[in-house]
Image (tube, rainbow, N blue to C red):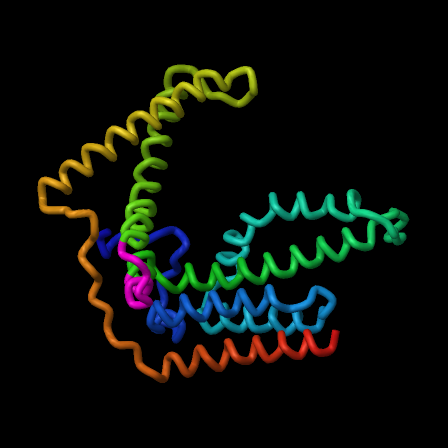
Protein backbone atom coordinates (compact mmCIF):
# COMPACT_ATOMS: atom_id res chain seq x y z
CA UNK A 1 0.00 0.00 0.00
CA UNK A 2 1.28 3.42 -0.88
CA UNK A 3 2.21 5.66 2.00
CA UNK A 4 0.22 8.47 0.46
CA UNK A 5 -3.10 6.68 0.87
CA UNK A 6 -5.03 8.44 3.62
CA UNK A 7 -8.30 6.95 4.84
CA UNK A 8 -11.33 9.09 5.64
CA UNK A 9 -11.17 8.16 9.32
CA UNK A 10 -7.78 9.83 9.72
CA UNK A 11 -7.48 13.41 10.96
CA UNK A 12 -4.19 15.08 10.12
CA UNK A 13 -2.54 16.52 13.21
CA UNK A 14 0.60 16.79 15.29
CA UNK A 15 -0.70 15.94 18.76
CA UNK A 16 1.13 13.76 21.25
CA UNK A 17 -1.13 10.83 20.38
CA UNK A 18 -0.48 11.30 16.67
CA UNK A 19 3.24 10.98 17.33
CA UNK A 20 2.99 7.79 19.39
CA UNK A 21 4.27 4.60 17.76
CA UNK A 22 1.40 2.73 16.07
CA UNK A 23 2.08 -0.49 17.97
CA UNK A 24 1.73 1.39 21.26
CA UNK A 25 -1.62 2.80 20.19
CA UNK A 26 -2.88 -0.58 18.96
CA UNK A 27 -1.97 -2.41 22.17
CA UNK A 28 -3.30 0.43 24.30
CA UNK A 29 -6.62 0.53 22.43
CA UNK A 30 -7.15 -3.23 22.74
CA UNK A 31 -6.35 -3.26 26.47
CA UNK A 32 -8.60 -0.27 27.13
CA UNK A 33 -11.54 -1.92 25.38
CA UNK A 34 -10.94 -5.16 27.31
CA UNK A 35 -10.99 -3.13 30.53
CA UNK A 36 -14.34 -1.62 29.56
CA UNK A 37 -15.78 -5.04 28.77
CA UNK A 38 -14.50 -6.58 32.02
CA UNK A 39 -16.32 -3.99 34.15
CA UNK A 40 -19.62 -5.13 35.71
CA UNK A 41 -22.61 -3.40 34.17
CA UNK A 42 -23.92 -2.25 37.54
CA UNK A 43 -20.81 -0.15 38.28
CA UNK A 44 -22.12 3.00 36.59
CA UNK A 45 -19.55 5.21 38.32
CA UNK A 46 -16.79 3.28 36.56
CA UNK A 47 -18.30 3.95 33.15
CA UNK A 48 -18.41 7.64 34.02
CA UNK A 49 -14.65 7.53 34.64
CA UNK A 50 -14.13 5.66 31.37
CA UNK A 51 -16.08 8.32 29.50
CA UNK A 52 -13.77 10.97 30.97
CA UNK A 53 -10.77 8.94 29.82
CA UNK A 54 -12.08 8.69 26.25
CA UNK A 55 -12.98 12.39 26.13
CA UNK A 56 -9.56 13.30 27.53
CA UNK A 57 -7.80 11.20 24.89
CA UNK A 58 -9.87 12.87 22.16
CA UNK A 59 -9.01 16.28 23.60
CA UNK A 60 -5.28 15.49 23.71
CA UNK A 61 -5.53 14.28 20.09
CA UNK A 62 -7.32 17.56 19.21
CA UNK A 63 -10.24 15.78 17.59
CA UNK A 64 -13.12 18.19 16.93
CA UNK A 65 -16.47 17.25 18.46
CA UNK A 66 -18.22 17.34 15.08
CA UNK A 67 -15.60 15.03 13.56
CA UNK A 68 -16.01 12.49 16.37
CA UNK A 69 -19.82 12.66 16.37
CA UNK A 70 -20.06 12.03 12.63
CA UNK A 71 -18.01 8.87 13.03
CA UNK A 72 -19.93 7.76 16.11
CA UNK A 73 -23.15 7.81 14.09
CA UNK A 74 -22.28 4.36 12.75
CA UNK A 75 -23.54 3.07 16.11
CA UNK A 76 -27.10 4.37 15.63
CA UNK A 77 -28.56 1.28 13.83
CA UNK A 78 -27.22 -0.98 16.59
CA UNK A 79 -28.65 1.27 19.28
CA UNK A 80 -32.10 1.08 17.69
CA UNK A 81 -31.96 -2.69 18.14
CA UNK A 82 -30.72 -2.31 21.72
CA UNK A 83 -33.75 -0.17 22.56
CA UNK A 84 -35.96 -3.21 21.94
CA UNK A 85 -34.36 -5.23 24.73
CA UNK A 86 -36.37 -3.59 27.59
CA UNK A 87 -39.55 -4.34 25.66
CA UNK A 88 -38.71 -7.96 24.87
CA UNK A 89 -36.86 -8.96 28.05
CA UNK A 90 -38.09 -11.31 30.73
CA UNK A 91 -39.84 -10.40 33.97
CA UNK A 92 -39.76 -8.80 36.52
CA UNK A 93 -40.85 -5.52 34.99
CA UNK A 94 -40.46 -1.98 36.26
CA UNK A 95 -42.40 1.19 35.45
CA UNK A 96 -40.41 3.78 33.47
CA UNK A 97 -42.26 6.88 32.25
CA UNK A 98 -45.51 4.97 32.31
CA UNK A 99 -44.11 1.98 30.38
CA UNK A 100 -43.71 -1.51 31.79
CA UNK A 101 -40.16 -2.49 30.87
CA UNK A 102 -38.12 -5.58 31.65
CA UNK A 103 -35.57 -4.95 34.39
CA UNK A 104 -33.16 -7.49 32.89
CA UNK A 105 -33.68 -5.94 29.45
CA UNK A 106 -32.85 -2.48 30.81
CA UNK A 107 -29.61 -3.74 32.30
CA UNK A 108 -28.72 -5.54 29.07
CA UNK A 109 -29.44 -2.42 27.03
CA UNK A 110 -27.31 -0.29 29.36
CA UNK A 111 -24.48 -2.83 29.26
CA UNK A 112 -24.37 -2.91 25.44
CA UNK A 113 -24.86 0.85 25.09
CA UNK A 114 -22.12 1.83 27.53
CA UNK A 115 -19.47 -0.64 26.43
CA UNK A 116 -20.13 -0.31 22.70
CA UNK A 117 -20.06 3.48 22.86
CA UNK A 118 -16.82 3.58 24.85
CA UNK A 119 -15.19 1.00 22.57
CA UNK A 120 -16.26 2.93 19.50
CA UNK A 121 -14.86 6.10 21.03
CA UNK A 122 -11.46 4.44 21.43
CA UNK A 123 -11.65 3.19 17.83
CA UNK A 124 -12.42 6.72 16.62
CA UNK A 125 -9.39 8.10 18.49
CA UNK A 126 -7.17 5.34 17.08
CA UNK A 127 -8.41 5.83 13.53
CA UNK A 128 -8.19 9.63 13.72
CA UNK A 129 -4.58 9.59 14.91
CA UNK A 130 -3.14 6.65 12.93
CA UNK A 131 -3.05 6.23 9.17
CA UNK A 132 -3.80 2.80 7.74
CA UNK A 133 -0.19 2.17 6.55
CA UNK A 134 0.98 3.04 10.08
CA UNK A 135 -1.45 0.53 11.58
CA UNK A 136 -0.09 -2.16 9.26
CA UNK A 137 3.46 -1.24 10.26
CA UNK A 138 2.41 -1.44 13.90
CA UNK A 139 0.92 -4.89 13.37
CA UNK A 140 4.18 -5.97 11.77
CA UNK A 141 6.00 -4.62 14.81
CA UNK A 142 3.72 -6.71 17.03
CA UNK A 143 4.70 -9.82 15.04
CA UNK A 144 1.29 -10.26 13.46
CA UNK A 145 1.44 -12.93 10.70
CA UNK A 146 2.38 -11.24 7.45
CA UNK A 147 -0.46 -12.89 5.54
CA UNK A 148 -2.97 -11.12 7.80
CA UNK A 149 -1.40 -7.69 7.36
CA UNK A 150 -1.16 -8.26 3.59
CA UNK A 151 -4.86 -9.16 3.36
CA UNK A 152 -5.79 -6.15 5.51
CA UNK A 153 -3.71 -3.84 3.33
CA UNK A 154 -5.27 -5.09 0.09
CA UNK A 155 -8.75 -4.95 1.62
CA UNK A 156 -8.44 -1.30 2.65
CA UNK A 157 -6.94 -0.31 -0.69
CA UNK A 158 -9.53 -2.05 -2.85
CA UNK A 159 -12.55 -1.09 -0.77
CA UNK A 160 -11.91 2.43 -2.04
CA UNK A 161 -11.52 1.16 -5.62
CA UNK A 162 -14.77 -0.81 -5.44
CA UNK A 163 -16.61 2.13 -3.87
CA UNK A 164 -15.41 4.37 -6.72
CA UNK A 165 -16.59 1.82 -9.30
CA UNK A 166 -19.96 1.62 -7.58
CA UNK A 167 -20.40 5.41 -7.66
CA UNK A 168 -19.54 5.49 -11.38
CA UNK A 169 -22.04 2.73 -12.13
CA UNK A 170 -24.79 4.48 -10.13
CA UNK A 171 -24.07 7.68 -12.04
CA UNK A 172 -24.27 5.80 -15.33
CA UNK A 173 -27.60 4.22 -14.30
CA UNK A 174 -29.03 7.59 -13.26
CA UNK A 175 -27.94 9.20 -16.54
CA UNK A 176 -29.97 6.53 -18.34
CA UNK A 177 -33.11 7.29 -16.35
CA UNK A 178 -32.84 4.66 -13.61
CA UNK A 179 -32.47 5.75 -9.99
CA UNK A 180 -33.60 2.89 -7.74
CA UNK A 181 -35.42 4.16 -4.67
CA UNK A 182 -38.19 1.58 -4.17
CA UNK A 183 -38.24 -2.18 -3.65
CA UNK A 184 -39.86 -2.66 -7.05
CA UNK A 185 -36.76 -1.16 -8.68
CA UNK A 186 -34.11 -3.34 -7.05
CA UNK A 187 -33.78 -5.89 -9.88
CA UNK A 188 -31.49 -3.68 -12.03
CA UNK A 189 -29.60 -2.77 -8.86
CA UNK A 190 -29.09 -6.46 -8.05
CA UNK A 191 -27.82 -7.08 -11.58
CA UNK A 192 -25.39 -4.20 -11.18
CA UNK A 193 -24.09 -5.67 -7.93
CA UNK A 194 -23.64 -9.03 -9.64
CA UNK A 195 -21.70 -7.42 -12.47
CA UNK A 196 -19.53 -5.61 -9.92
CA UNK A 197 -18.80 -8.88 -8.12
CA UNK A 198 -17.69 -10.57 -11.36
CA UNK A 199 -15.61 -7.53 -12.36
CA UNK A 200 -13.95 -7.38 -8.94
CA UNK A 201 -13.18 -11.12 -9.01
CA UNK A 202 -11.61 -10.83 -12.46
CA UNK A 203 -9.61 -7.77 -11.39
CA UNK A 204 -8.30 -9.72 -8.39
CA UNK A 205 -7.11 -12.51 -10.69
CA UNK A 206 -5.34 -10.05 -13.00
CA UNK A 207 -3.65 -8.31 -10.08
CA UNK A 208 -2.53 -11.64 -8.63
CA UNK A 209 -1.04 -12.74 -11.95
CA UNK A 210 0.71 -9.38 -12.31
CA UNK A 211 2.18 -9.74 -8.82
CA UNK A 212 3.33 -13.30 -9.50
CA UNK A 213 5.06 -12.16 -12.68
CA UNK A 214 6.96 -9.61 -10.56
CA UNK A 215 8.22 -12.17 -8.06
CA UNK A 216 5.39 -12.34 -5.50
CA UNK A 217 5.67 -15.59 -3.50
CA UNK A 218 2.66 -15.29 -1.21
CA UNK A 219 4.05 -12.95 1.42
CA UNK A 220 4.63 -9.22 1.33
CA UNK A 221 8.04 -7.75 2.27
CA UNK A 222 8.21 -7.04 6.00
CA UNK A 223 7.84 -3.40 6.96
CA UNK A 224 10.78 -1.67 8.57
CA UNK A 225 9.61 -1.02 12.13
CA UNK A 226 11.61 1.57 14.08
CA UNK A 227 12.37 0.91 17.72
CA UNK A 228 9.67 2.17 20.08
CA UNK A 229 10.95 4.51 22.81
CA UNK A 230 10.30 3.03 26.28
CA UNK A 231 8.75 6.34 27.38
CA UNK A 232 5.88 5.78 24.95
CA UNK A 233 5.13 2.37 26.43
CA UNK A 234 5.29 3.97 29.89
CA UNK A 235 2.77 6.67 28.94
CA UNK A 236 0.37 4.11 27.49
CA UNK A 237 0.82 1.87 30.54
CA UNK A 238 -0.28 4.66 32.87
CA UNK A 239 -3.57 5.12 31.02
CA UNK A 240 -4.21 1.40 30.64
CA UNK A 241 -3.35 0.57 34.25
CA UNK A 242 -5.63 3.36 35.48
CA UNK A 243 -8.56 1.88 33.58
CA UNK A 244 -7.83 -1.63 34.80
CA UNK A 245 -7.55 -0.41 38.40
CA UNK A 246 -11.02 1.13 38.03
CA UNK A 247 -12.29 -2.15 36.55
CA UNK A 248 -10.79 -4.14 39.43
CA UNK A 249 -12.33 -1.77 41.97
CA UNK A 250 -15.70 -2.11 40.23
CA UNK A 251 -15.53 -5.91 40.41
CA UNK A 252 -14.67 -5.80 44.12
CA UNK A 253 -17.38 -3.32 45.08
CA UNK A 254 -20.22 -4.99 43.17
| Residue 116 drawn at (x, y percent) | 59, 57
Q: Is residue 138 left or right of residue 45?
A: left
Q: Which residues are magenta?
A: 137-146
Q: As rendered, which of 81 and 55 lies closer to the eye?
A: 81
Whether the magenta-drawn stretch holds residue 144 is answered as yes
Q: Residue at x 29, y 50 (%)?
A: 153
Q: Is residue 68 left or right of residue 166?
A: right
Outermost residue to the left: 214
Whether the magenta-drawn stretch holds residue 176 is answered as no
Instruction: For the C terminus, give its image quadrant.
Output: bottom right
Question: Eyeballing the image, is 149 above or below 27?
Answer: above
Q: Residue at x 35, y 52 (%)?
A: 7
Q: As rendered, which of 193 and 19 lies closer to the eye?
A: 193
| Residue 190 drawn at (x, y percent) | 44, 21
| Residue 136 drawn at (x, y percent) | 31, 59
Q: Residue at x 82, y 54 (%)?
A: 103
Q: Is residue 10 left or right of residue 158?
A: right
Question: Eyeballing the image, is 241 above or below 65?
Answer: below
| Residue 87 drawn at (x, y percent) | 79, 44
Q: Residue at x 40, y 19 (%)?
A: 191
Amino acid sequence: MADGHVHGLYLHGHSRIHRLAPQVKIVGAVLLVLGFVATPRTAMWAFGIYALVVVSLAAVARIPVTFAMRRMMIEIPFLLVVLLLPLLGSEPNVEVLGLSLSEAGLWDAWNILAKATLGLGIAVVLGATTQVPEILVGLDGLKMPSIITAIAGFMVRYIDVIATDWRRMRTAMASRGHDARWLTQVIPLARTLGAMFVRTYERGERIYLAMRSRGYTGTMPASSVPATPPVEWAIASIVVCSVWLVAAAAVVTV
